[in-house]
Image (tube, grey):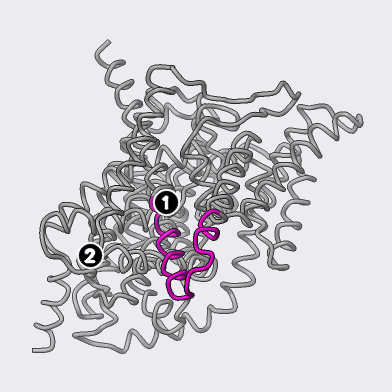
Amino acid sequence: MKNATHSASWQGQLTLRGALIGCIGCVIITASSVYTALKLGALPWPIVFAAVISLFFLKLLGHTTLNEANVTHTIMSAGAMVAGGLAFTIPGAWMLGLGDQIGWTEIFLVALAGTILGLISTALIHRHFIVDAALEFPTGTAAAETLRATEAGGATGRELFCSMGVAGLWSVLRDGVGALPTMLAALPIPGITFGIYNSPMMLSVGFLVGWVPVLFWFAGALFSNFGLIVGGSAAGLWDIATARGIVSSLGMGLMMGSGTATVVKDILPEAKTIVSGLRHEATEEKDSPYSLATGSLRLDAGIFGIAAAAVALLVCFALGLGPLPAIVVVLFAFVATIMSAQSCGQTGIDPMEIFGLMALLAVAALSGVAQVKLFFVAGIVAVACGLAGDVMNDFKAGAILGTDPRAQWLGQALGGIIGAIVAAAVMVALVSAYGPDAFGPGKEFVSAQASVVATMVSGIPSLPAFWVGLISGIALYWAGLPAMLIGLGVYLPFYMSFTAFLGALAKQVYDRIQRARRKGMPEAEAQEAQKEADEAGLVVASGVLGGESIVGVIIAFIAVAAGLAG
């Protein structure tokens, strides 16, 4: 009877209509996430956005529950971080002129391998991080609270789709018909692309990230561009070309240092506890709350063992890496997903490309695989870590709302596979439409993280600057400062950081206006009004981000179709 009740519980939450809505949303969000990650060099979590859409459409179809909506948005958001793992690594090969060695098949196999490894790992570690360690997972918590807040009203859906429509129309006018300029208020400063990026999406990123984090981001941009490039070249310390190499190397070092410090400070001290939790889970035999696939840990272990072996064979033969790299990738992916879960749980940040770089460097040190195949290594591990971060956030939302984790894990598996197919297709469509030369700092698709991977493979422009950045990143993280954001500001083109800063400034103005409106209200009424204002701002900003990125993908597909027809 216990098993029947448990089965009915998860099957009642993973429904056919929810799966259909989730799969359609997964295709759209995955496609837009590829575009966003390549265009901005960043990828905000889509979980809250997916949660609002899921609840909206389920309500249109009749009565629903928060648990059904939670599982639906789990399916819907799964492909986004698969897309991020690919977008943060694979385009580096295009930058090095290796695009003719990577097609849809190779990209899909990388995504598939990473997705399977991410699913296996999270099935094993979910209980430890969600129940035993009870980490915060701020993004998952926000998704749960958003579902609760939007359950009773329909205004949220209107705000979401109106903002998507406005941003989409703006993008069509700018990119489709050329009626709007790409850059505003541009100034001819040597070595710096100064201006305001005419992108509602970039403004919304700054709005969503918030004032204090963006200040650190913008501080990195000011230091690198006006301190090192303008100031250093004006002082005769170096020329502009050398300054740019120093800046890119410093930015890479800061991001690598932050990732390294995350592992040393936050992950390794928890390793013993994590292992103990996994051993405890292994003692459960059947009808186990620890089992997410079949209800039996013994059967799960067999399935996961076969799946891991299948991935190793796929990496070894289909991707041509050989036996030793294949084993390293599988083992490292498991360790890296634990790091990813820990980082997401404590900070809400998933440095997936850093973990991919670590795996790349390990494989490069142990074997002599071809340069292009090192990108496969980084991509597999980055996808696994990205999916792990998304899964664990979804589990946290489920723990708050009382959702069955098995329904969520099965939904994540469905969305992850769809995401792997769609993300690979969009990657190929974009490079076919714009060409490999469109990817890299200062180009159509900034691809910041992939550029870091390409630089690590081909050689760092300034080793001293990289080591300074690495040590500084570790020190800053240890001091409690956001080294990853500072490094991103150092590395990205100035116009992107400046536009994000303006978005964060808009959030400050918005908050001040809302506080003025609440002045004089009773405390309880003021708190409710603040909650509604925060939710409305979050939904509108998410809709803006989604609208522009979706239109960008559509334009790319039209360009590919026109090229094929011609």
Please tell me which residue is depicted at 91% across the width and 32% down the height of the picture. Answer: 235
Q: CA distance from mark 2 to mark 1?
A: 21 Å
Q: Residues within 10 Å of mark 1 (few under 14, many from 20)?
A: many
Asked whether, in this view, residue 554 is left or right of residue 129, the answer is left
Please tell me which residue is depicted at 63% across the width and 47% down the height of the picture. Answer: 488
Residue 401 rendering spot, x and y as whole percentages: 30, 75
Asked whether, in this view, residue 509 is left or right of residue 86, the answer is right
Give the position of the C terminus as an image quadrant: top left
Q: Are circles 2 and 1 on residues that touch, CB within 8 Å?
A: no
Quadrant location of residue 400? bottom left
Residue kind at label 1, given as amino acid type: Ile
Asked whether, in this view, residue 155 is left or right of residue 440, the answer is left
Residue kind at label 2, given as amino acid type: Leu
Say which label, 2 or 1, has the lower sequence index: 1
Q: Which mark is residue 410?
A: 2
Q: Which mark is residue 380?
A: 1
Q: Is residue 207 one of those drawn in magenta? A: no
Q: Which is nearer the eye, 381 or 139?
A: 139
Count of numbered marks: 2
- The region drawn magenta spans 513-539
Q: Depth-wise, is mark 2 or mark 1 nearer the camera?
A: 2
Please tell me which residue is depicted at 46% across the width and 56% down the height of the picture. Answer: 324
Q: Secondary structure at mark 1?
A: helix
